[in-house]
Image (cartoon, helix red, strand yellow):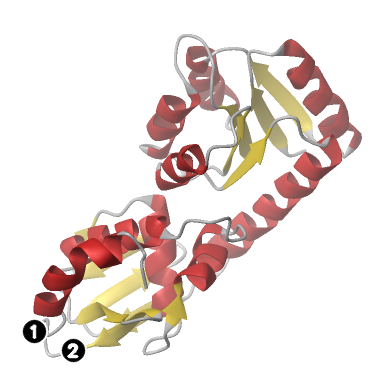
């Protein structure tokens, strides 16, 4: 059976999640603080983690960050705060989805199933992508440039893979959010710009470049190794970072 870890210091929330998830055939493990959540991740190896943002001993952001240093397990964040900034921070740390309290438990179960489907679909194909001297191994979730491994965060890998599956195709930010993050656009696309900046820095030695299509979005193209976009990008960095197009 598929194991779900529910980490929340509100016992009524934990009990509600356990009841609805168990009814859907899941095995449910629980934790009531951040440190216990980390221990349970190591002990039970869950297929998905439901993680409250505000927990004692260690908050959900820190738990998410530590999990992401060692695992790609899907994470759904729970919060009583509806601030978009909280959502952006959680998603940039590697969370896969976000649910605001109070929530409909049936919606949470539906999101759990949807995230698991996306995760399983992204890890089953053994396809290897090549763009210039850039190689992306979907099965190993490994990226190399000229044979040298490049360490990427989980969402950096997902974003790069999305672009590499369709080289030369322009994606707007909202489309990239949906394809790489797996959630609907909710009001701020700056997280895409941040991840593109990180990828460009890590892929400097690659002949595959993420190019900005001004007023539209991004595309991945093969080049001769030079970066004609660099000068314009420096001049326009404040506007791009703010997602002002």
10 Å neighbourhood of mark 1: few (<14), some, or many (≥20)?
Answer: few
Q: Is residue 17 visible?
A: yes
169 lies left or right of 211: right
Label 2 element class? loop
Determine whether the residue tagged by mark 1 lies in a helix, strand or loop.
loop
Q: How far across and how far down the image is residue 185, in percent?
A: 58, 61
Residue 128 in sight in this render:
no
Residue 57 badge: none
Image location (x, y in percent) of residue 219: 35, 81
Tell me the residue at 17%/82% (across/down): 207
Picture disc at residue 226:
1
For the residues labelled 1 and 2, say whether their Cβ atoms are less than 8 Å apart.
Answer: yes
Q: Residue 88 lies in what quarter of the image?
A: top left
Quadrant of the image occupied by residue 244? bottom left
Q: Residue furthest top?
A: 57
Q: Does residue 134 sit above or below 197 in this rendering?
A: below
Q: Is residue 83 above or below residue 243?
A: above
User: Mark 2 packing: few (<14 Cα in 10 Å), some, or many (20+)?
Assistant: some
**Please, is residue 224 above or below residue 109 in the view?**
below
62 vs 99, left or right, is left
Q: Residue 223's mark?
A: 2
Is residue 215 left or right of 208 when viewed as pictured?
A: right
The quarter of the rendered structure image containing the N terminus is top right
The total number of labels drawn is 2
Q: Is residue 25 above or below residue 118?
A: above
Q: Residue at x 24, y 88 (%)?
A: 222
């Amino acid at each position: 059976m598929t194991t779900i870890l529910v980490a929340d210091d509100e016992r009524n929330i934990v009990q509600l999640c356990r009841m609805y998830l168990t009814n859907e055939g899941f095995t449910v493990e629980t934790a009531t603080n951040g440190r216990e959540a980390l221990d349970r991740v190591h002990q039970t190896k869950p297929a998905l983690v439901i993680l409250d943002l505000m927990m004692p001993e260690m908050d959900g952001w820190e738990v998410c960050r530590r999990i992401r240093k060692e695992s790609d397990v899907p994470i759904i964040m729970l919060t009583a705060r509806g601030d978009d900034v909280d959502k952006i921070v959680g998603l940039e740390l590697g969370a896969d989805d976000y649910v605001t309290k109070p929530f409909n438990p049936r919606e949470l179960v539906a999101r759990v199933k949807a995230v698991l489907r996306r995760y399983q679909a992204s890890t089953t194909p053994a396809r290897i992508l090549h763009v210039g001297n850039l190689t992306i191994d979907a099965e190993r979730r490994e990226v190399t440039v000229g044979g040298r491994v490049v360490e990427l965060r989980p969402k950096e890998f997902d974003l790069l893979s999305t672009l590499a599956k369709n080289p030369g195709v322009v994606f707007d930010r909202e489309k990239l959010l949906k394809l790489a993050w797996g959630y609907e656009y909710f009001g701020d696309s700056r997280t895409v710009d941040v991840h593109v900046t990180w990828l460009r820095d890590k892929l400097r030695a690659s002949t595959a470049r993420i190019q900005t299509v001004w007023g539209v979005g991004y595309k991945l193209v093969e080049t001769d190794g030079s970066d004609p976009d660099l000068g314009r990008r420096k001049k326009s960095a404040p506007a791009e970072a703010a997602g002002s197009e």
